[in-house]
Image (tube, rainbow, N blue to C red):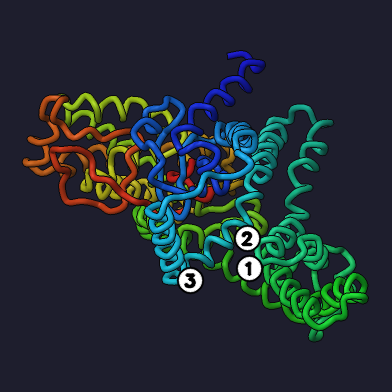
Amino acid sequence: MAPADTPDRNRATAEAILPLVGGAANIASVAHCMTRLRLGLHDRSLVQDEALKALPAVLGVVEDETYQIVLGPGAVARVTPEFERLVEAGRAPQAAAPTAAGLAERGAAIKAARKARNATPFKLFLRRIANIFVPLIPALIGCGIIAGLNGLLTNLHWLPALVPALAALASGFMSLIAVFVGYNTAKEFGGTPILGGAVAAIIVFPGVANVDAFGQKLAPGQGGVLGALGAAVLAVYVEKWCRRVVPEALDVLVTPTLTVLVSGLVTLYGLMYVAGEVSTAIGDVANWLLANGGAGAGFVLGGLFLPLVMLGLHQALIPIHTTLIEQQGYTVLLPILAMAGAGQVGAAAAVYVRLPRNGSIRRTIRSALPAGFLGVGEPLIYGVSLPLGRPFVTACVGGAFGGGFVGLFNQLGAAVGSTAIGPSGWALFPLLDGNEGLGEMVAVYGGGLLVGYAVGFVATYYFGFTKSMLTDLNAPAETASPADPSAVPSAVPSAVPESGPVPVRAGADDTLEPVAEGRG
C-alpha cells in the first residue's frame, strides 16, 4: 500500500474499534505501549468482545487494569492518535445519566481494581520502573541499529568518511541517557520532570571528574541509569517537601534551587558512588554467570521467561538490560530470553500438525506465525498455547533449550548480545553485537532459534496433549474448541472444554520485553 493510504487505513481501524468499545462516551483514558492500545472504560459491559476480536487489525485482547487491544508494533503507534481524535470529537457535552445497575457495577470494578493494586505493591513498583524506561525504547532501537550498521562498515572498511558520523548518531543518545531517565523518573513519581533531568545531568557532566568524594575522584557517568533514577527520585521528594514549607511567594525561586542543590550534593557525595558499585556488580554478575555456567543459566532464563511475563515480573529486567547496554554496549541477556519466543513458534507448529481437523485453531496459527517469527508472541500465547495448557509448558521447554544453546556459547567465550531492548525473534538480528565477529554472532543466535523451534515442536508433539484433549480438539469444526486468535487467557487450564476456549485474564504487563511484546 502506498504511504499516502496509510493514514486512511489507520483511521479506518480506529473507526472500527471505537463503537465496539462503547463509543467515545465510554472511554475514560487512552494510552498505548509497544503493541497494545490501552483503554480505561467507564462501563466494561458495553464492549463487544467477539466483534472486536473479529476485526482484521486486532491480534488479540488482554484484560488487566485497562482494556488492552493488541494491534502489533508500529500499527498501535499510528492508530492511537487517530483513535484519540475520534474520542475527542465524539464526546457529547454531557454524558447520559448512568443507571443504578451501571453505577453499582462501576463501583464494584473500581473497588476490585483498587484491591488488586493494594495487594501487589511490588508489581506496581515494577510497573512504575517500566514506565520510566519504556519511552526510551524507540531511541535505543534506532541508535542500536545505527551502531550495528557502523560496526559493519568499520569491519568491511567501507565508507570510512561516514563512520565517524554514524558513531556520533549511535552514541549521542547513550551518552545522555541518564538525563532522559531522570526526566522520566520525576514525571512518573509526581515531580517536575525538568528538575529530575537537571539533577540526573550531573552524573554525565564531564566536570564531575574534578570532584573529590571520599578520597576518590568521580568519573563522568559513574552510577549510570541507576544513579540517575535514584537522584531523580530524591529530587522529587525534596521538591514535594519544599512545596509544603516554602511560602508561595518564594516558591518559584527557592523550590527549584533547593531541589537541585540538595539532591545534587547527595548525588555527588553518595549516590554516584553507591550506584556505580551496584551497576558494576550487575555487569560482573551477568558476565560471570554466563562465563561459568552459561548453558545452565541460559536454560533457566529461557525456560522461565514466559512465566515471568505472565506474572509481570519481567519488568525488573528492564533496568538491568539498560545498565548492561550502557556499560558494555549490549545486553547479553536479551538473546537468551528471546529464545522463549522460538519455543512458542515450535509449539504452535506442533499444535497445527496435531490438530488436522480443527480448522479454527489452525487458522489462528497460520495468521499468528509470521508475527511469532518476528518476535510478537501475544497471538500465539493468548490464542493458542496458554488456553490449551500443556503447549504453554512445552513451549517453555523449547525456550529453555534455545536459551541453553546461546548460553553455552557465552560460556565458551562467544558473548552474543543486543544493542537495544524490545525486538525479539528475527527482528533481533540487526541489533546483534558482542565480542566476536558478526557472522559468528548471527550463527549462534540463529542456531539458538532453530533449537528453540525444534525442541518446542518435538516437546509439544509428544507431550503437549492428552488423549482426551486430542479427541475433543480434533472434533469437527462446528464442535471443536475454537482457540480464537484474540482469546485472552488468565490461567493455564488442564484441559479445554468442548464448548469453546478457556477465557483468561492476563495480568502481566507487556513492556518492551521479547516474546510477549515483540519487546516486553
The foreground one among 274 and 197 is 197
Amino acid, disc 1: Ser
Please state, as top left, top right, bottom left or bottom right, where the N terminus lies in the image: top right
Q: Residues within 10 Å of mark 2 (few under 14, many from 20)?
A: many
Q: Position of residue 71 (x, y in %)?
A: 49, 34
Q: Identify the mark at residue 279; answer none if there is no mark.
A: 1
Tell me which residue sits at (69%, 71%) in the image: 233
Q: Earlier in the sequence, mark 1 or mark 3?
A: 3
Q: Is residue 392 above or below residue 315?
A: above
Asked whether the beta carbons under mark 1 and mark 3 sit within 8 Å of each other, the answer is: no
Query: Distance between the Cα atoms at labels 2 and 1?
Result: 7 Å
Quick one: label 2 or label 3, which is nearer the N terminus? 3
Q: CA distance from mark 2 to mark 3?
A: 24 Å
For the residues bearing labels 2 and 1, Cβ distance under 8 angstroms: yes
Residue appearing at x 51%, y 49% in the figure: 40
Find disc 2 in the rendering and name its residue.
Answer: 323
Residue 425 visible? The answer is no
Residue 121: which numbered mark, if any?
Answer: 3
Residue 83 in view, yes or no:
yes
Looking at the image, the residue that sits furthest to the bottom is 214
Give the label, 1 or 3, closer to the camera: 3
Q: Residues within 10 Å of mark 3 (few under 14, many from 20)?
A: few
Q: Type of residue at label 2?
A: Thr
Question: Element under label 3?
Answer: helix
Residue 511, x across and y down, in percent? 52, 50
